[in-house]
Image: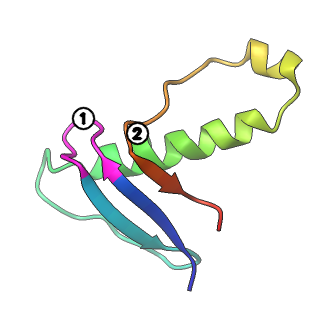
Amino acid sequence: MDFINITGASQNNLKNIDVNIPKHLVTVFTGRSGSGKSSLVFNTVAAESEQLLNESYSSYIQFHLNQQPRPKVKKIKIFL
């Protein structure tokens, strides 16, 4: 099985966590308010996916895109 591997995520409420998210399956993130669910999903996984997608565009298009900062992680592997 393939995974999205995240090592050392420290975005917002996340405190240097490591997580493997299975690909091609429905995955649910649950927890208390402020536990880092949105930080992991939106500010880490989605942000890195957007960066990888934007890098595939021509330099002209990249120049006109709104640049988002990279997530605060030691290592992230989305495509294996």
Residue 14 is left or right of residue 9, and the answer is left
Based on the picture, tell me whether residue 43 belongs to the magenta stretch.
no
Amino acid type at mark 1:
Asn
State the SS at label 2: helix
Question: 74 or 54: which is nearer to us?
Answer: 74
How many residues crowd mark 1 within 10 Å: few (<14), some (14–19), many (20+)?
some
- Give coordinates of residue 77: x percent, y percent: 55, 58
Mark 2 highlights which residue? 43
- Give coordinates of residue 37: x percent, y percent: 27, 52
Q: How far apart are marks 1 and 2 (CA)?
A: 8 Å
Viewport quadrant of the N terminus: bottom right
**Residue at 84% of width from left, 32% of height from top?**
57
Q: In this view, does 64 lie above or below 15?
A: above
Q: In this view, does 54 lie above or below 33?
A: above
Which stretch is magenta? 8-16
Residue 54 is left or right of residue 31, and the answer is right
Viewport quadrant of the C terminus: bottom right
Q: Are marks 1 and 2 in contact (CB under 8 Å)?
A: yes
Based on the picture, tell me whether residue 12 belongs to the magenta stretch.
yes
**Residue at 49% of width from left, 31% of height from top?**
70
How many residues crowd mark 2 within 10 Å: few (<14), some (14–19), many (20+)?
some
Model colouring: rainbow
**Secondary structure mostly seen in the magenta stretch:** loop
Q: Total number of numbered labels?
A: 2
Which numbered disc flags the more N-terminal residue, 1 or 2?
1
Q: In this view, does 63 lie above or below 56?
A: above
Mark 1 highlights which residue? 12
Question: In this view, which residue lies farthest toward the front?
Answer: 74
Amino acid type at mark 2:
Asn
**Residue at 22% of width from left, 45% of height from top?**
14
**Residue at 23% of width from left, 64% of height from top?**
30
